Image (tube, rainbow, N blue to C red):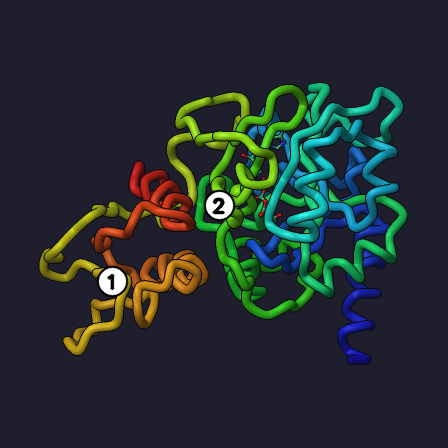
């Protein structure tokens, strides 16, 4: 407990000095910096090799602080009440007098905001007088990190500190919804669209290739950097084979995502497994078919992008 507190203090120490810190969230780990600081947010882009045109998500723990920066509306409050803190990101209209760095928004008049659930990150946010800009803590287009070790894998000594927070419970990024005008799903994620529709009384669907609305949703993304084949029944020789359900057959090229086709478990293990296969230096990956329902839709979206290598 004492150690946790001192690690949160350490994170604050570096963040106050405009340094970047790795932070745990329930979705994936983030690379965080003071969202009001040009210096800190510039560092995020540089470390990630992220194109400047791709805006950042800003993390809050209080509504009051959010309202310094954005206009809220009824749809926002409905979803906030139901899902926050949790894996949902809202795109809202930015206030003219907000202190958010221009780097974060790419000079646009909207801001993507999120209330992460992870206890340590919430404690950290509570101790700060600014919100945290935090994209996923991976080099641009690569696999997102779900543990402190993964973040180390990506940045090594280039970042000053990573706050330890165990493996991310969800293992996939947040769902992004644009609430500036008529609600629109910009990215599939940890919360199923059907749940959002229930709360809003809408029939929203995810429409692919709405590119440049969520500019980071390029075709190639979440990539292990090796060819990947989807919906495969039988792997090729020496190919890593990802299966969604444990089988009796053995083989060191077999990687199971869950015991019994549980989509939450599959989601949680997906990035970890892709990273493991990459580190084992396989030359290609085959993936068994994954049901395209609920979280399965998000998982398939990520796999499809990861396969566009
Ligand atoms: O779960 C998550 O959302 C994780 C954790 C760390 O919070 N973060 C994350 O950030 O996935 P990132 O940067 O990897 O993905 C953010 C996505 C990008 O596709 C970006 O283009 C989009 O959000 N985005 C950011 N600001 C936006 C805005 N104002 N309008 C539309 N899309 C925006
Ligand atoms: Mg990302």
Quarter in which the N terminus is drawn? bottom right
Q: Compared to 101, does 82 lie above or below? A: below
Is residue 85 or residue 216 the one in the foreground? 85
Q: Position of residue 53 (x, y in %)?
A: 59, 24
Q: Is residue 112 left or right of residue 138?
A: right
Q: Compared to 164, does 82 lie above or below? A: above
**In the rendered image, is residue 284 in sight?**
no
**Total tally of numbered discs in the picture:** 2
Q: Secondary structure at mark 2?
A: loop
Residue on which the image places disc 1: 243
Q: Reading the chain from its start, which is encountered first: label 1 or label 2?
A: 2
Q: Position of residue 96 (x, y in %)?
A: 84, 20
Task: Tell me if label 1 and label 2 are in contact, CB under 8 Å.
Answer: no
Is ligand 1 less than 8 Å from the beta carbon at label 2?
Answer: no
Q: Quadrant of residue 259?
A: bottom left
The picture quadrant for ligand 1 comes to top right
**10 Å crowding of disc 2: few (<14), some (14-19), many (20+):** some
Q: Quadrant of residue 241?
A: bottom left
Residue on which the image places disc 2: 192
Identity of the residue drawn at 41% across and 48% down: 294
Q: CA distance from mark 1 to mark 2?
A: 23 Å
Identity of the residue drawn at 42% across and 26% down: 207
Quarter in which the C terminus is drawn? top left
């Amino acid at each position: 407990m004492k150690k946790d507190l001192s690690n949160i203090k350490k994170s604050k120490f570096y963040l106050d000095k405009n340094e970047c810190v790795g932070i745990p969230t329930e979705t994936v780990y983030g690379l965080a910096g003071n969202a009001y600081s040009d210096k800190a947010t510039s560092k995020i882009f540089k470390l990630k090799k992220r194109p400047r045109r791709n805006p950042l998500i800003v993390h809050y723990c209080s509504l009051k602080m959010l309202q310094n920066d954005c206009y809220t509306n009824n749809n926002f409050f409905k979803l906030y009440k139901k899902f926050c803190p949790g894996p949902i990101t809202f795109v809202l209209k930015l206030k003219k007098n907000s202190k958010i760095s221009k780097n974060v928004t790419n000079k646009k008049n909207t801001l993507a905001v999120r209330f992460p659930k992870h206890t340590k990150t919430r404690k950290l946010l509570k101790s700060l007088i600014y919100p945290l800009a935090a994209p996923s803590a991976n080099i641009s287009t690569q696999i997102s990190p779900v543990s402190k070790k993964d973040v180390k894998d990506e940045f090594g000594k280039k970042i000053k500190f990573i706050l330890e927070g165990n493996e991310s419970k969800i293992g996939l990024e947040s769902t992004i919804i644009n609430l500036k005008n008529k609600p629109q799903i910009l990215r599939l994620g940890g919360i199923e669209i059907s749940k959002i529709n229930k709360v809003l009384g809408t029939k929203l669907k995810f429409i692919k290739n709405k590119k440049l609305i969520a500019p980071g949703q390029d075709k190639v993304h979440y990539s292990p950097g090796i060819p990947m084949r989807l919906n495969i029944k039988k792997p090729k020789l020496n190919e890593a084979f990802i299966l969604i359900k444990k089988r009796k057959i053995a083989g060191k090229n077999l990687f199971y995502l869950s015991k019994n086709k549980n989509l939450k478990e599959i989601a949680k293990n997906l990035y970890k497994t892709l990273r493991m296969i990459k580190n084992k230096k396989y030359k290609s990956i085959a993936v068994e078919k994954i049901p395209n329902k609920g979280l399965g839709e998000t998982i398939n979206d990520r796999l499809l992008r990861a396969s566009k290598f």
